[in-house]
Image (spheres, coloured by chain):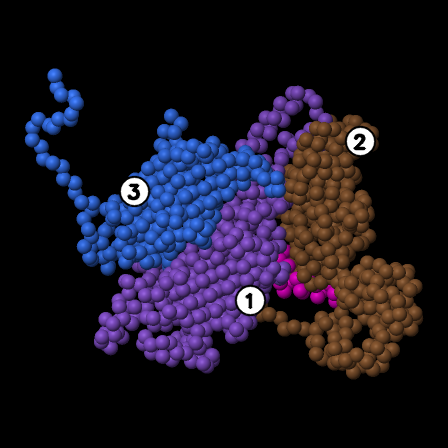
Amino acid sequence: MPITILPPKAFRDQPPRHSLNHDSDDVMSDATFDSEDSDSQPGGVSLDGGATIHPRKRHRSGAGAAASSTFTKRPKTNAAINSIPRSAIVTPGERITTDPQWMRGHGTYLSSASLGEQAITSSLAGIVTRTNKLLSVRPLRARYTPEVGDLVVGRIVEVQAKRWRVDVGSTQLAALPLSAINLPGGILRKRTETDELQIRTFFAEGDLVVAEVQQLFQDGGAVLHTRSLKYGKLRNGVFMAVSGTGGGGGVVRSRRQVWTLESANNGGPIDVILGVNGYVWISKHVEPVVPEEAKGQTGITNLEEVVSATMYSSQNDRIEPETMREIARIRGVVTALVENGLRVDEDMVTKGYNEAVELALVSADGPEDVYLGGERGEQLAAALTAV
Amino acid sequence: MADRRRINGPVGTTNPPIYDDAPEKQSEGVKVTRSRPANVIRKMYLKTGVTPSASGSAYLEIESSGNGGSGLKLSCSVHGPRALPRSTPFSPHIILSTHVKFAPFATKQRRGYIRDPIERDLGTHLETALRGSIIADRWPKSGVDIIISIVEGEQDRETSKAQGIEAWDTMNALSGCITVASVALADAGIDCVDTVAGGVAALVQDAGNDAAPSIVVDPIPSEHEKVLAACCIAYLPTRQEVTNLWFKGDLPASDMDVYTQLIEKGIQASKSANRVLVDCLNETVG
Amino acid sequence: MASSQHVLLSPAELAYLHASLNLTPPIRPDGRSPTQFRPLVAETGILPGTNGSARICFADGTEAIVGVKAEVERTRTRHDFPSLDEGTEDDDDLDDNQNDVIKGDNDWVEMTVEIPGYRDDDAGTVFLSVMLSEALLADGEFTKRLWINQRFHWKLYLDILLISPPLSYPLPLLSLTTHLALLAARLPRLKSEGDEDPLFDDDWAAAPYLYPRPSEKGSKATAPAPAARPPVTLLVMAVGNNIIFDPSKEELAVADVALAVSVGESSSTTTSTTSSKPTAMDIDTEETKGHNLRLLSVRTIDPPSRLTPPGIPNASNSAYGANAGVKDTEKKKQQQEQARTAESEAVEGVWKAPRGGAKTLVMATMVQKVLEKGGVADEVLDALDGVDLN
């Protein structure tokens, strides 16, 4: 069957994703909210029917029914107000609190409420989160915002005289200065003019790098570095971009962003790099090769020099078809996770991969079938969420 | 001593030359039919270096269809390779930009100065055809502009039959564009893997009602009752590869043989044009 | 948008993709089989204000909408048209001539393609719309459907909209959507007769389809007479000897050659020439079931692969660790030689942008794969049959 054409799905209520608002539970339990919020919504009840389109309502679909039901409950002012932090979904312009004990965080702004009071107001559609006394709104979807120490996968888009500009899926291009890479031929070699002239031999436009965010500019731009043996140019695999941290599905910050997966069907070990920015690299795991001449010599500097030999290579190693097949399978798993709104981390990918291998065993085409699109993706996601 | 100041007449008597009227007026009902064999292309005139200010240039003229119409006259100039503007992102290859324009008076229907979709489409086809032939990585970070003006398009004087034929004429125009641009590129000294030339073949139905459709190269649509399908091919003869293929028409899917033959004839036409092209280049160099 | 728009992929990625697509059978990055299309969601009749409309979207969110609008327009009289006075002299004569006179003009169809983020006079956008209209007009039959009488005709506007910037070359998506919209398109029923000013039936339910349906689905005995269908344009690419359908952007970036093949289906079987008859007789049962496919157009699409950055073999890479510190001139020389061989022949695992064109055999196979009985075009048309038209 070369083509599957599906009828459009009937619009259905999607249950709220519980994983998203678990942070807000403690906000809700905070007693101060109850008293203060009655001020923050002055005269909410006495307003006309327009108030029925109240952002608090949890149902984003079926507007008519949901809105009217909210409306009937509204006369119980306190109960309705209590529900603000419970639902914890706010929209731009919605007042969160006027209590001065809270500090304004990301996704909010201060607006003057009545009697010279300052109210913390949401500037985004998202979930209220509380960190100690800091109130911030996490958007439902957002582009990646770099943080120091993030492991990211990026693509070189521009080569300048002394640095590269790297696309990391953020609002701005990140910078990778020439001084922040390990130069070949000695880990602590001095940067020379020759290096500047042949800057393109290290990384050129289009190259993919795995790097770490070293520092941030005031404007949110990131500066990267690859001064470690685990960073550098990416080879032997496939790239895919999913949405990064910021809510919904996509890559989430977790304990390990990089790990090696022992694949089934003679695929051998496969490296998975989940960039915090949502860029994913799946490749064959290659043990660093130590050239003959270096074997006799010892010393830590020398070893590091040898290991970094392949850091700027753009030549792939030999990859067995079995490995390629399993790489395609893992890629399919990640796509299925994203398309079904599930988070992408080591745990889910590993579980999803094992599930996919099981699925392939029962499929008509046998274990060689790695297709996970369409219905199979949904099947996979269903199997994962059921556990 | 003979009188050298004036031109004397011949000694004997002669008959004054009488020039025949250009091909006899076609009386109604008599159609011009193809006089060439089915696998011979029309004669063409090709010359390089016609625009001194350009890095490379060429001019192509294809003889007219002996029907009082005009042939195809193309002029191509190549500018570059030259540096790209600063704002353009780095390119490891030469950036090709093609520009095909009919002169406003080139066709029966006057064309404006702004390129219409057909001209843009021709430009895209041309780009595809040329991109396969040049060695693009020899000229990183540079660009080359190929500008073709179709000074005179192929057309028939007889208005009545013109309808629906223009579409097929674009194929001939494209084939000419490819050939002339290929020569101009070589003239500009841009590395090519091979010389590409264009060729057209068509499946035509001749005037006789029961005649079976036949395949001809370099068709002139007005010479045939109906053109069923046509293809334009850009071919690299020494590598035996096709860089651009454009087929158009209506063929039953069960007749793959006809399609294959059509392509083969197109390649043959391209090879013939290529011989002219190589001769022309030899002449330029020699 | 140009198919050759700058695709930024690293040489290592390209080499990997090319290697995996060059295997037998090829392994596509998303695990599809070579002839498999991305799953899509399709519906028709979404815009009540149009004569016909359709929408198709992919799982990645790429979505196309096509609306067909028809307007009555006065036909420009041409000098080669038989003058009206002569024609109306005799009623019988008029009836006889009626069928002969029906003729269309390519100007009666106007197609526009709108892709967000691209200018509408962008070469690629123009290329797409010319390609789609070329397939539609190729057989010269389509415009005849727009004929009302000798003085009037329908002017058909086909507006193709892509909702978001495309994530891959949008040709198949646009073509399939256009196909569905045309299938769903209806023109009001004509009430007037002859050459008088046209008058139409208000009842939309009575409006006939632009492409008439096969009589009824229930009566199996008579139904198989295949009805004419609008064309579909399929994108096919080849890597080595593997032929791959509906390529994604990444796959197209390593294509050796890419073709857009337009296929139509006609109701008449008489046009097939004698050579095909014997085979048709052999598989009689197939013949009645299969589609009467016609090849309408083939175009080479400039694959973006030619613009990709080449990889550097380790042997000639000055930044490759083992070479970096080397001072020995002897070794340098050796490297240069290796580098020279790398220029001429392919090194395994190193990407090199393809040069030159494609072998004719590969191109012929690509077209064959589309057209053969039970081939991809057959199955795509079958699948499109399943879409509910309303």
> At 23% from the left edge and 57% from the top edge, which residue is drawn?
B208
Instruction: Give the vertical position of A26 relative to B165 (above or below).
Output: below
> At 56% from the left edge and 32% from the top edge, which residue is drawn?
C343
Q: Label 1 neighbourhood size at 10 Å, few (<14), some (14-19), many (20+)?
A: many
The magenta-colored residue range is A365-387
**Picture quadrant of residue B41:** top left
Labels 2 and 3 within one chain: no
**Left or right: C28 with respect to A350?**
left
Q: Is residue C303 visible?
A: yes
Q: Which residue is mark 2?
A: A188
Chain identifier of the blue chain: B
Name the element at disc 1.
Answer: strand
Chain C: its colour in the image is purple
> At 64% from the left edge and 31% from the top edge, which residue is drawn?
C315
Residue type, numbered disc 1: Arg
Measure the alpha-carbon separation of dots 2 and 3. 71 Å
**Left or right: A234 with respect to C227?**
right
Q: Which residue is mark 3?
A: B63
Measure the alpha-carbon separation of dots 2 and 1. 59 Å
Chain A: its colour in the image is brown
Q: Which residue is mark 1?
A: C55
Residue B14, horizontal then vertical, whole percent: 9, 32
- The residue mark sitting in front, 1 or 3, is 3
Residue A217, horizontal then vertical, whole percent: 79, 46
Q: Is residue A350 visible?
A: no
Name the element at disc 3.
Answer: loop
Instruction: Give the vertical position of B151 relative to C81 (above or below).
Output: above
Q: Give the position of the N terminus of chain A as an image quadrant.
A: bottom right
